[in-house]
Image (cartoon, rainbow, N blue to C red):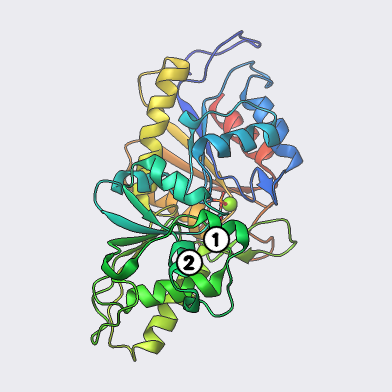
């Protein structure tokens, strides 16, 4: 900020620092705002001792809806207008792969939502587990499509279809059925539904939108996440193929440095279009609740970035007080409100 500021400064914008927030366990739990989060948003929007606006973005591993829909949900939860230009979810970076693959299987989320997200990203031919079950109901012995799922799933003859890649966009709503279908493809001849390879090394690549083994939802204890599904898939593949096969799996999301770099680019655009700022911020404060994703990634990007990435761990989510976090934050605070106050104190 350079020069000392006498409060309040109408419409002044913090130009040397920015905040980025994880969502589950920091701002929201089980679909409801953590109360301090609403106050933290007001604080960022000028209700702070200096009367300044503090630019901020959101970076969640969650997903399952379009960025627009997620922003609408978050806006009503946090009582603040949040725009897609300041929002990244787990599957957002997958949009960059829409041109790479022809036919893709999309896993996770409610109903047809993730198919629509993928088509919105430009993926040309999107198959769901429902399409495969509709084609052959014996695929998943205990999963029967509901009448609604049956009518939404597409009629297709899979005898000639090659699945070029599998994308797990959001948490599975039917782990057994989805893992079965993923294993079938991993063991198939070159991604052909219903076939079996002798060598188990011809399956398509599998992309997960993140790798969180657990996450913070409404329950008092953490809940299983996509990373757990990935582990079950990988371990079972090994068991079924006697360790002979070859699986090609990748995860996007935090803690991947590329995800933070993607966030950094979005942050640059957002600061420019929304606040008219051109020079990059000196410090990015990242507030998260999961040491393995949020703190690990922030500390890792801090090692390679030109600016400072400052990790703040909160006590409202995955991290449990009294345990030693697997990755050490710069500071641990009770809530997201304490986190934004700490950042502002450090800057002013
Ligand atoms: O499924 C969502 C979860 O694994 C993490 O979301 O907001 O804590 O990155 P978030
Ligand atoms: Mg979280």
Q: Are marks 2 and 1 in contact (CB under 8 Å)?
A: yes
Does the image show residue 5? Answer: yes
> Who's the residue at 24% across and 50% down the image?
100
> Who's the residue at 53% across and 66% down the image?
213
Q: Position of residue 140 (x, y in %)?
A: 51, 76
Q: Is residue 77 left or right of residue 245?
A: right
Above or below, comparing residue 288 to residue 306 in the picture: below
Quarter-wise, where is residue 251 in the image?
Answer: bottom left
Front residue of this view, candidates 310 and 181: 181
Query: Label 1, on which residue?
Result: 150
Is the residue at mark 2 in contact range of ligand 1, meaning its CB lies under 8 Å from it? no
> Who's the residue at 49% across and 31% down the image?
84
Q: Earlier in the sequence, mark 2 or mark 1?
A: 2
Query: Label 2, on which residue?
Result: 134
Q: Position of residue 273 (x, y in %)?
A: 42, 18
Q: Which mark is residue 245?
A: none
> Who's the residue at 64% across and 15% down the image?
51
Q: Is residue 260 left or right of residue 217?
A: left
Quadrant assignment for the C terminus: top right
Q: Position of residue 218 (x, y in %)?
A: 73, 56
Q: Position of residue 22 (x, y in %)?
A: 55, 45
Tell me the SS state at disc 1.
Answer: helix
Tell me the SS state at disc 2.
Answer: helix
């Amino acid at each position: 900020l350079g020069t000392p500021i006498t409060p309040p400064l109408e419409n002044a914008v913090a130009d040397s620092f920015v905040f980025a927030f994880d969502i589950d366990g920091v701002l929201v739990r089980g679909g409801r705002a953590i109360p301090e989060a609403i106050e933290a948003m007001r604080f960022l929007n000028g209700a702070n001792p200096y009367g300044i606006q503090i630019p901020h973005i959101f970076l969640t591993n969650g997903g399952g809806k379009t960025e627009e829909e997620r922003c609408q949900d978050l806006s009503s939860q946090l009582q603040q207008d949040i725009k897609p230009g300041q929002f990244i979810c787990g599957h957002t970076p997958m949009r960059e792969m829409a041109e790479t693959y022809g036919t893709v299987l999309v896993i996770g989320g409610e109903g047809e939502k993730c198919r629509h997200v993928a088509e919105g990203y430009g993926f040309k031919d999107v198959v769901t587990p429902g399409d495969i079950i509709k084609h052959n109901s014996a695929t998943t012995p205990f999963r029967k499509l509901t009448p609604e799922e049956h009518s939404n799933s597409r009629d297709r003859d899979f005898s000639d279809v090659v699945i070029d890649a599998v994308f797990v966009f959001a948490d599975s709503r039917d782990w057994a059925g989805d893992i079965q279908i993923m294993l079938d493809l991993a063991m198939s001849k070159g991604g052909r539904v219903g076939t079996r390879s002798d060598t188990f090394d011809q399956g398509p690549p599998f992309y997960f939108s993140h790798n969180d083994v657990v996450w913070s939802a409404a329950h008092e204890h953490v809940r299983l996440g996509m990373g757990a599904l990935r582990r079950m898939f990988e371990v079972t593949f090994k068991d079924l193929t006697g360790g002979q096969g070859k699986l090609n799996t990748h995860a996007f999301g935090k803690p991947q440095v590329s995800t933070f770099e993607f966030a950094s680019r979005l942050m640059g655009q957002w600061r420019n279009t929304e606040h008219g700022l051109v020079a990059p911020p000196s410090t990015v404060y990242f507030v998260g609740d999961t040491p393995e994703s949020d703190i690990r990634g922030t500390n890792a990007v801090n090692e390679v970035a030109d600016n400072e990435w400052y990790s703040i761990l909160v006590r409202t989510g995955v991290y449990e007080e009294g345990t030693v976090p697997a990755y050490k934050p710069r500071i641990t605070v009770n809530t997201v409100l304490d986190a934004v106050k700490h950042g502002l104190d450090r800057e002013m």
